[in-house]
Every structure is written in C-alpha cells, then in structure tokens.
Image (tube, rainbow, N blue to C red):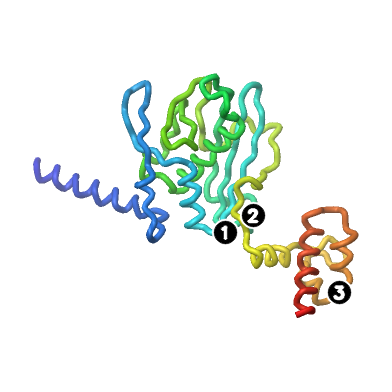
C-alpha cells in the first residue's frame, strides 16, 4: 500500500511539473505573483493570479497578440465576452480561447465600473482557459460567483454578481468585437506592414493589397489616402504608406 501511495505521489508531482511548463516563458516565473484568495463560504484559501499578470504573461508569450472584448448591457448587468488571439492578424474566428463574465454595480466597490470589471473577469477566464493560470486553479472550474476585483493584488469578495462562463451569454443584441483597449501596441514597422496588407477599396484593384497597388498605380494609392471616405482605417493605412514612400525618396 505504501508503495502505491509513493508511486501516486511521484505521478502527481510529475503532472504538476508538466502543467507548470504550459506557456513557459524563459526567465519568467508567474508563481511569484500569485496571491491568496479565501473563499468566504468555505474558508478555503487558494492561489489566484491577478489578471494584469496574466495579460503580461500572455504578451510575453505572444508579442503580436490581440485581446478582443465585446460588452452588452442586460438589465442591471454588463456581460463581457473576451477572445484572445496569438496574432493580431488572425481571423476573427481563429482565437485561442473565449470566455464571458457578468458584473453589476456593487455598493462595496462604488468606484469600480461594472463594465470594466466584467471585461477584466472575462479576459482572466479566457487567459486561464488558454493555459495562462491553470497552475493556480483546476482546469475547467469556473470562477466563483463572488470573484474579487481581478485587478487588485489582494482580492476581496462582493455580492450581486452572476456566475462567469466559458461560453457566450445572451447572444442577442451583441456589439461587434473591439480590441482597442487591450490590443498589443505595434511598432512602427508592424504598423507599416499592417498597412501594406490592407486590401484596396477600389473596384479596379479588388483583391489586391495597398502594397500591390503602390507598385502598379501609385496615383490610386494617393487617391485612397486623400479622397476615399468609405473606411477611415483604410485611408490612414494608405496615408502611412505614402508618407513612408515620401520619406524614403527624400533620404
């Protein structure tokens, strides 16, 4: 019997070591940032990783990442759904993980925005599901309905929240996915490359990127930059390419 117990202990230890290697980043140890969380119902204390650390860890693992969040208001609750992507260029449905969370106003935390709170919770669950925090909580187990403000290093509980889930809630009346608040900041070179890959809106060059149009019809690119009004992002991309080309010619 003792031999069996010893073998089981060794197996558990090996399993833990394998779990700790998930999304490993050289030189970074997330365990040092873990905080104690005490369940007010059971009194049990467990380790939790603050969402800000999860985000930092994710950005180190995937430097060209994207975190997209959509929020809807359902009566007194804000429902947030987060998707995380390994690369900002990935199609909208090619995400690593998705999760949702709901929060409402708390009298115990009058300065906390329930909208931002819901977004933070959804991001934290999505990152955990993608392996950024599985070391601190059993995989598949939802956050407790009284999940603390995840941005705080010392968690405290609150009432009037509804459970978080790993799948969409109330899909009707959803806002389009946005990622402005959480998208990784691009370098100048990455911004230029993204502009180059933008599709040209001119029918004549349908299916061609702005980079391709630049080589065959520079005047068309100038028109997109200065006169095209259909999509501001496309116009800005064309302007960026034109400015870059002009600066190179002046060198």
Q: Which of 201 and 148 is in front in this view?
A: 148
Q: Is 232 drawn above or below residue 246 in the view shown?
A: above
Q: Which percent across, then down, holds residue 139?
A: 39, 41
> SS of the residue at dot 1?
loop
Image quarter of residue 187: bottom right
Q: Quadrant of the C terminus?
A: bottom right
> SS of the residue at dot 3?
loop
Residue name at image x 56 percent, y 48 percent? 84
Callout 2: few (<14), some (14-19), or many (20+) C-alpha neighbours within 10 Å? few
Q: Would you name the residue on which mark 2 appears?
A: 91
Residue name at image x 49 percent, y 40 percent? 124
Q: How far apart are marks 2 and 1 (CA)?
A: 14 Å
Q: In this view, does 229 lie to the left or right of 25?
A: right
Label 2–label 1 contact, CB within 8 A: no
Q: In this view, does 216 lie to the left or right of 113?
A: right
Q: Earlier in the sequence, mark 3 or mark 2?
A: 2
Residue name at image x 47 percent, y 48 percent? 130
Q: Is residue 65 left or right of residue 19?
A: right
Mark 1 or 3, closer to the camera: 1
Q: Would you name the residue on which mark 1 appears?
A: 64
Q: Is 213 drawn above or below residue 199 in the view shown?
A: below
Callout 1: few (<14), some (14-19), or many (20+) C-alpha neighbours within 10 Å? some
| Residue 217 tag number | 3
């Amino acid at each position: 019997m003792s031999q069996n117990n010893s073998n089981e202990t060794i197996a558990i230890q090996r399993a833990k070591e394998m779990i700790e290697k998930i999304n490993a980043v050289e030189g970074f140890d997330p365990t040092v940032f873990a905080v104690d969380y005490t369940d007010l119902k059971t009194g049990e204390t467990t380790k939790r990783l603050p969402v800000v650390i999860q985000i930092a860890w994710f950005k180190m693992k995937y430097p060209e990442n994207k975190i997209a969040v959509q929020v809807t208001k359902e009566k007194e609750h804000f429902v947030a759904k987060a998707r995380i992507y390994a690369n900002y260029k990935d199609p909208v449905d090619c995400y690593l993980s998705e999760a949702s969370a709901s929060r409402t106003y708390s009298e115990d935390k009058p300065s906390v925005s329930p909208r931002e709170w819901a977004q933070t919770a959804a991001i934290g669950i999505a990152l955990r599901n993608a392996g950024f925090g599985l070391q601190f909580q059993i995989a598949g187990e939802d956050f407790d309905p009284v999940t603390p403000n995840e941005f705080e290093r010392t968690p405290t509980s609150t009432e009037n929240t509804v459970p978080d889930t790993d799948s969409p809630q109330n899909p009707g009346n959803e806002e389009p996915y946005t990622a402005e608040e959480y998208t990784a900041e691009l370098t100048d070179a990455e911004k230029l490359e993204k502009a180059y890959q933008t599709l040209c809106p001119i029918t004549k060059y349908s299916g061609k990127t702005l980079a391709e149009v630049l080589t065959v019809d520079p005047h068309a690119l100038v028109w997109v930059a200065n006169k095209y009004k259909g999509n501001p992002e496309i116009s800005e991309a064309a302007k960026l390419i034109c400015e870059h080309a002009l600066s190179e010619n002046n060198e």
